Amino acid sequence: MRRISSGMNDTDVQSRLRIQEYKLNKANNQLGSQRRIQELRDDPIAAGHLVRYQSFAGRVKQFEENAQTLTERFTVREGYMNDSLQIMQRVRELAVQGAHGTYTKDDLQNMAGEVDQLLRQMIQNANAVDQDGNALFAGTNTKVTAFEVEMGNVEGSGVPMIQEVIYNGNVASNNVEVDEGQYLEVNNSGNRTFWADKQTLTSGRDTTNWVAQNDSLISVDGKEIQVSAGDNIYAVIAKINNSDAAVKASLDPITRGLHLQTTDARQLWLKDEEGSVLTDLGVISGTEQRPPYNYATGTRVSGGSMFDSVIALRNAMLKGDQEAIGSRVLGSLDSGLGNLVTRIAENGSSYERASLNVTRNSQTALNVTQMIATEGDLDFTKAVTDMKMMDYVHQASLSVAGKMYSSTLLNYMR
């Protein structure tokens, strides 16, 4: 029940005017921001959807940027890998020419000069960096020179030449998120890209009676493998073979030691993460020296890099050893060429996948933007019409109120 009094008209008019001013101000704010929802209470359900859509749009944008960065990096890497492939093809041509026996020793020594220069160019490619100064072929250890060169005297040459090329990076890979919960693995390990042969390792220690004394953790090719107390050599072999590592393990029938071989052309990467299993098995020398050059004394290792193959060709040419060129060296060069072609194909496949993610995320971003517009954007035509109507009502209200209070002090002075 409302109480009727002389002040009721004034109170009602003032209340209605305030409501009209609030609505008019809200309409002006909506037009100014072009947003329908100014506060959460304007439309709680739509506001909740809008917050989720905006969050998703930000993630999609980041996924697109991640994939775009990967495509650029894959493109740069492929350029250096293709150049290295051309170098290896030229090296193989020289090897074939030097192996068929028509060239003299002096001719082979002259050819060795070109092989040495090609070797230097290939090392330059392997040590390439991107626009940010990050090594392209050093795994995740991007702030180091991927391959170090050791110089020395070589038979048949009067000047120091490259004797050995040592890998400084690691075998770790990055998982880059390119979709919601979906990752693209990026592996930049140079000791896979520039490797020639499957590497094998055979421990010289008899492990028949070996038993793990404690729970331990070993790393094989960058994959962690848990070894439990009480495991014998056969259990360790089974765990390595059942892991994701690109390595097959067995027991050597002669030395009765652990035998490891990579499933494709790459360098073995072995490390004791916790405990000393690989050290006790006589595979590595301990944790003092970093992989991959931490093999134990007495361990037989075979299989080298493409640099080793080119160095072997150059040295055989300097010596005039045509037999070595036509057998062992040429076979290693062919293996290195095949591996490099495979790595280029893998890089191209990763590039295509990253490109597809760029395209899809770009389209998804457009769809999400449309959803955001549907929930939160203002219908401009309707908003202008509504504001004009409210302005008209407001002016009419002011006019009516002015007529209700038309009496002034002058009326009483007549």
Image (cartoon, helix red, strand yellow):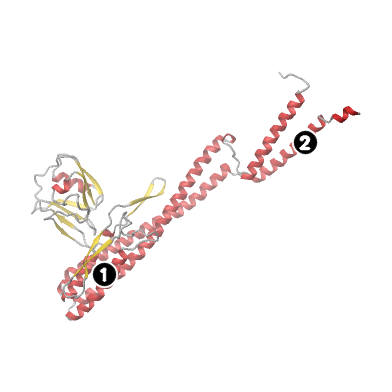
Task: Check the picture and name the quadrant holding the N terminus.
Answer: top right
Q: Name the residue beneath numbered marker 2.
A: 396
User: For the point 52% across and 39% down, which residue is it?
Assistant: 49
Which class describes the residues within 10 Å of circle 2: few (<14), some (14-19), or many (20+)?
few
Hey, what amino acid is under mark 1?
Leu
Q: What number of labels is visible?
A: 2
Question: In the depicted view, which residue is nearer to us: 286 or 76?
Answer: 286
Q: In the displayed structure, does residue 221 sit left or right of residue 78?
A: left
Residue at which label 1 appears: 119
Nearest to N terminus: mark 2 or mark 1: 1
Assign a secondary structure to mark 2: helix
Question: In the figure, 258 relative to 166: above or below?
Answer: above
Name the side, left or right, on which 313 lies relative to 411. Answer: left
Q: Position of residue 370 (x, y in %)?
A: 54, 47
For image coordinates 32% across by 64% down, the residue present is: 81
Q: Could you say whether the residue bearing mark 1 is in a helix, strand or loop? A: helix
